[in-house]
Image (cartoon, grey):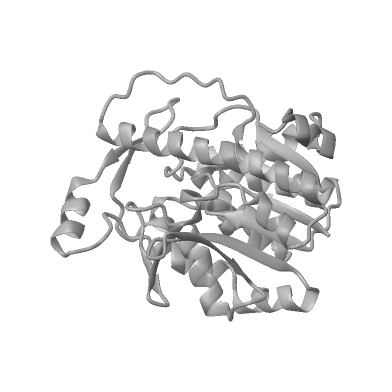
């Protein structure tokens, strides 16, 4: 069984879409299993249901209003510079005063999911034997859960896709089955292990971060930048663990892993959804691996025993 795993990464999911287009159209990959977290969870249902063109349109044309019904952010754009985020204090105040558990509302994203990934697309997955799995964080039980398209009805599965992408407290909290759910990236950004546990023998893994860990940021300038950089640090550490554990799992089951990393840090602000930026990332993801091979990993028992090549 061949699987595609797509990591979390907010707007950087556009780059993953470009890589997936390359794999599906240039490399003629045919996947039985798709596993994703957060933005990866948003992308994979469209890929699995043979909606590559729709995926490209969604990931290269959406803006903040397509994600947030009430956004806790304002986006500042200057010609020739990367967009910047600022807190939307009015929206945040309104959310707090009405007793909301979050400072933003991402109901618009839920609507986007149901209008782009339709019931007929969900039925296509069953007809073709494709399985889509998304990662969610159950905050009530303090555990990760993996929700498969083969185990739920359409409406429930759309809820799980939405929950997987909700970065808290900036986006909505899903309350379902007497539990509260949010972004699966809080526990598993790159769900390699889940793909292997479900039977994959070769896995293409799209990681929305550079392979190199030597990144040096300038000092933070405000509270929001401190918060987003702290989140980035947390996700980076989780990704490091995901990669190490995924490689160990691959060694135990003789699974080949092909990693597709970004060539550089695409952005610090993954919650800015800028159409021009995301279009450029999609195109870059589609083109970069035409001349660059993926990082292939097949760990032998001996390699595992001496602990090399695991990080």
Image-quadrant location for residue 307: top right
Nearer-the-camera pick, 156 or 281: 156
The residue lying furthest to the bottom in this view is: 153
Residue 200 position in % (x across, y down): 79, 57
Quarter of the image with the C terminus is: top right
Nearer-the-camera pick, 101 or 180: 180
Image-quadrant location for residue 49: bottom right
Residue 3 position in % (x across, y down): 76, 56
- Residue positioned 41% across, 65% down in the render: 141
- State whether residue 298 appears in this view: no
Q: Is 61 situated above or below 124?
A: above
The residue lying furthest to the left in this view is: 97
- State whether residue 219 appears in this view: yes
Residue 38 position in % (x across, y down): 52, 54
- Residue positioned 61% across, 55% down in the render: 36
The residue lying furthest to the front in this view is: 305
Q: Is 123 situated above or below 59?
A: below
Q: For the image shown, how many numbered marks are present on the structure?
A: 0
Position of residue 16 in the picture relative to residue 159 (left or right): right
- Residue positioned 83% across, 34% down in the render: 302
């Amino acid at each position: 069984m061949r699987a595609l795993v797509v990591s979390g990464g907010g707007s950087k999911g556009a780059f993953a879409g470009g890589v997936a287009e390359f794999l599906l159209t240039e490399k003629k990959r045919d996947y039985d299993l798709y596993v994703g977290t957060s933005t990866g969870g948003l992308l994979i249902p469209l890929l699995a249901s043979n909606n590559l063109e729709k995926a490209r349109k969604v990931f290269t044309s959406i803006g903040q209003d397509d994600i947030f019904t009430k956004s806790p952010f304002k986006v500042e754009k200057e010609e020739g510079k990367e967009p910047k985020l600022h807190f939307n204090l009015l929206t945040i105040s309104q959310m707090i005063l009405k007793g909301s558990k979050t400072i933003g509302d991402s109901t618009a994203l839920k609507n986007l999911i149901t209008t782009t990934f339709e019931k007929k697309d969900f039925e296509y997955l069953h007809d073709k034997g494709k399985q889509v799995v998304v990662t969610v964080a159950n905050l009530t039980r303090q555990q990760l859960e993996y929700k498969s398209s083969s185990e739920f009805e359409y409406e429930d599965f759309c809820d799980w896709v939405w929950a997987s992408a909700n970065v808290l407290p900036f986006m909505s909290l899903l309350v379902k089955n007497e539990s509260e759910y949010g972004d699966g990236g809080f526990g598993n950004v790159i769900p390699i292990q889940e793909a292997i546990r479900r039977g994959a023998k070769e896995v293409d893994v799209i990681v929305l971060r550079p392979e190199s860990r030597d990144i040096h940021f300038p000092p933070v300038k405000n509270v929001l930048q401190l918060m987003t950089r702290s989140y980035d640090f947390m996700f980076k550490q989780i990704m490091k663990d995901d990669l190490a554990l995924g490689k160990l799992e691959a060694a135990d089951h003789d699974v080949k892993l092909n990693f597709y990393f970004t060539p550089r840090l695409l952005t610090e602000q993954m919650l800015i959804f800028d159409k021009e930026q995301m279009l450029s990332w999609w195109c870059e993801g589609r083109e970069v691996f035409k001349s660059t091979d993926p990082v292939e990993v097949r760990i032998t028992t001996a390699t595992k025993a001496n602990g090399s090549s695991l990080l």
